[in-house]
Amino acid sequence: MKSLKMTFLAAMLAGTTMFYSCSDDSNPEPEEQNESNEILISSNSQLGNVITDGNGVTLYFYSKDASGESACLDGCLDKWPIFYLESPELASGLEASDFSSITHSNGELQTTYKGWPLYYFSPSGNGEVESSGATAGEGVGGVWYVAKPDYSIMIANTQLVGNDGQNYTSSYEVGEESTAYFVDSEGNTLYAFAKDYKEINTYTAADLSNNSVWPIFEVSPEVIPSVLSSGDFGTIEVSGKTQMTYKGWPLYYFGQDASRGDTKGVSVPAPGVWPIVNQNTEEAVVQPTIKTIEHETLGEIMVDAQGRTLYFFTKDVTGNSTCAGGCLNAWPVFYSEEIVLPNTSQIDINDFGTTTATDGSMQTTYKGWPLYYYSPSGDGTIEDAGETLGEGVGSVWFVAKTGYSLMIGDAQLVGSDGNNYLADYTVGDGTTKYFTDAEGNTLYIFINDSKDKNNYTKEDFSNNGTWPIFYIDITELPSLMNAEDFGEIEVHGEKQLTFKGWPVYYFGGDSDRGQTKGVSVPSPGVWPIINNDTELAK
C-alpha cells in the first residue's frame, strides 16, 4: 500500500511539472547555473577568444571605465550586473597578475582584468544574465565590448582633460563632452601627431632621444574590438622599433599621462597638435614628395619630402639634363616616381615631368627644368634640410622656385641659319647666358627699338606672330637678376615687358624651349638675346 501511494504521488508531481512546463512555455525560466569559481577562455566563432565565468557566461568591458573605476551606476547595473570572484581559478592563458578587484560605488566588490571592471550582460534588464556562450552585449551603445585576454587596443569613452586642466570636446575646443578614443589593453591613451604623414613618423628622433616624451606604441594590431576594421591598422619600422598605425597614422603614448585614462596630451603644446584617435579619425595623407617652404632670404623655394632644397641648372635650358660625370657627385639628381603635393599646395602637378639624366637614371623636371640636390662636399652627401648653399654657385645653379617669372639659360647660341654664335654674334663655339621665360623660352630685344618704345609691332598686330610681344608680372627672379631693370609699356592696348628700357619679345621661329634661332634673323645681332650685359636702351 505504501508503494502504491508513493507511485501515485510521483505521478501527481510529474503531472504538475508537465502542466507548469506547458503553460509557461513562451517564457522559459533562465537556465540555472552551477556555482563555479573559475574564469575561463571560451572560443567564439565570430569574436575569437572571450573571457567567461566558469559556466561559459560572457564577461564584458565598459569603455567609460577607462580610469579603472566603474562608471556603470544605478540602473545601468540592472542591465550590466557586476562580476566578482574572491579567489578565482584561472584557465590556461590567463595570468593572476592581470586580475584584481575594486569596490564599486554601491559598496560591492568587482573583479577587474588589466584594470577593466568586469560585468555580465542582462538582455532583459532585470539582472538575469544571458545564456552561456551568448555575446549579445558586444558593441551595445558603442561602449560595451566582450572581455578578451589579448586585446591589442581597446576603446575608451570619457571626458578629454588636457595637461592644462581644461576639459575638451572632440573638436579640441574647451567644453564638456564624452569622447571615444583608443587606448592600449590597460587603458593608456593613444595619440597621433598632426605633422605625421601616412605611415611616416616625423616626430621620433633617429637616436630615440625624444621617445620618452611621446613614446612609440609598440604593439602589433592582432586583436581589436569588433566594431573596428583590421584593414585600418598596420605597422611601420621606426629606429629599430615596430610602431602601430591606424589609418596610416603612427600611434604614440604621452609620457606625462601618469594614469590609465589620462588624456593630458590633447592640449600639448596646443589643442589638436596631438589628437586622440578613434573611428572618426581621417586617413593620414601621403607625404608630399615635393613641397614649398618659406626661406628667410630667398622666399618660397621647392624642397623634397625631408625639406632638402632642389635646384635648377641654367645649362639645362633645353630641358635635357647636361650635368655629367663629376658634376653629378656635387649635384645629385632628384627623382620621384610619383609626385605627391600637399593638399593646400597651389603648385600645378601638370608642371612636373621626367627626363633621363646623363648617367641613365630618371630625373624629375619642373616646367621642363631638371631638378637636382646639392652636395657641398662633392661626394654625393646632400646638404641638410633648409640649407641653400648651392644658390648662385658658378652663376649657373639656382634654387628651384615655383614662382619664377623669368629664368636664365646658359648654352650655345644657334641661329636660324644653323650656325653657332658667340655673345658678340660672331660665328663660334661657346656658351652664352640669356634670359628666358619660366619654361625656358628665349627672350629677345630689337635693336631698332628705343627706350620704352616698341618700333616693331604693327597696330593691328599683323606681325606679332613673327616677334610676339612678351609680358609677365615680375614677382620672383633668380638672384642674379635685378628687379629694378624691368618695367612695362603699353603697345596698342597690350602690355609688354621691358628690360633696361628695351621692349622684350619672343621669336615665333623658336619652336622648342632653349632655341635661339632669332639671333641670326634677319642677320646676326638685329634681334639679340638679353642678359645682365645688355646695355641700357636710349
Image (cartoon, helix red, strand yellow):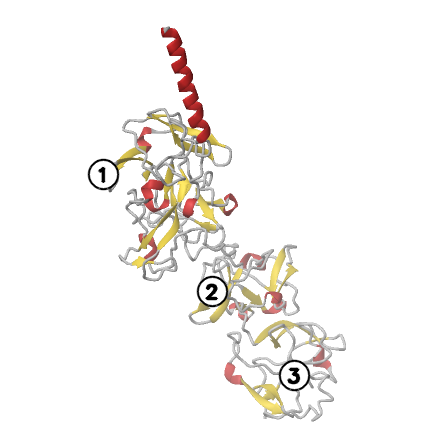
The amino acid type of the residue labelled 1 equals Gly
The amino acid type of the residue labelled 3 equals Tyr
Residue 275 visible? yes
Query: Label 2, label 3: how many angstroms apart (C-alpha)?
Result: 34 Å
Circle 2 packing at 10 Å, graded few (<14), some (14-19), many (20+), is some
Q: Position of residue 410 (x, y in %)?
A: 61, 72
Q: Quadrant of residue 405?
A: bottom right
Q: Quadrant of residue 338?
A: bottom right
Circle 2 SS class: loop
Question: As displayed, is residue 477 above or below residue 145?
Answer: below
Circle 3 SS class: loop
In the image shown, does 452 or 36 lie closer to the viewer? 36
Q: Please tell me which of labels 2 and 3 falls first in the chain.
A: 2
Circle 1 SS class: loop
Label disc, if present, on residue 389 of the rendered structure: 2
The amino acid type of the residue labelled 2 equals Leu
In the image shown, does 364 or 127 lie closer to the viewer? 127
Q: Please tell me which of labels 2 and 1 falls first in the chain.
A: 1
Q: Position of residue 40 (x, y in %)?
A: 39, 28
Circle 1 packing at 10 Å, graded few (<14), some (14-19), many (20+), is few
Residue at horizontal 39 percent and vertical 25 percent from the top: 92
Of labels 2 and 3, the one closer to you: 3
Query: Label 1, label 3: how many angstroms apart (C-alpha)?
Result: 91 Å
Q: Please tell me which of labels 1 and 3 falls first in the chain.
A: 1
Question: As displayed, is residue 274 above or below residue 93?
Answer: below
Residue at horizontal 37 percent and vertical 6 percent from the top: 1
In the image shown, does 33 or 246 lie closer to the viewer? 33
Circle 3 is placed at which residue position?
505
Q: Position of residue 77 (x, y in %)?
A: 32, 41
Circle 1 is placed at which residue position?
107
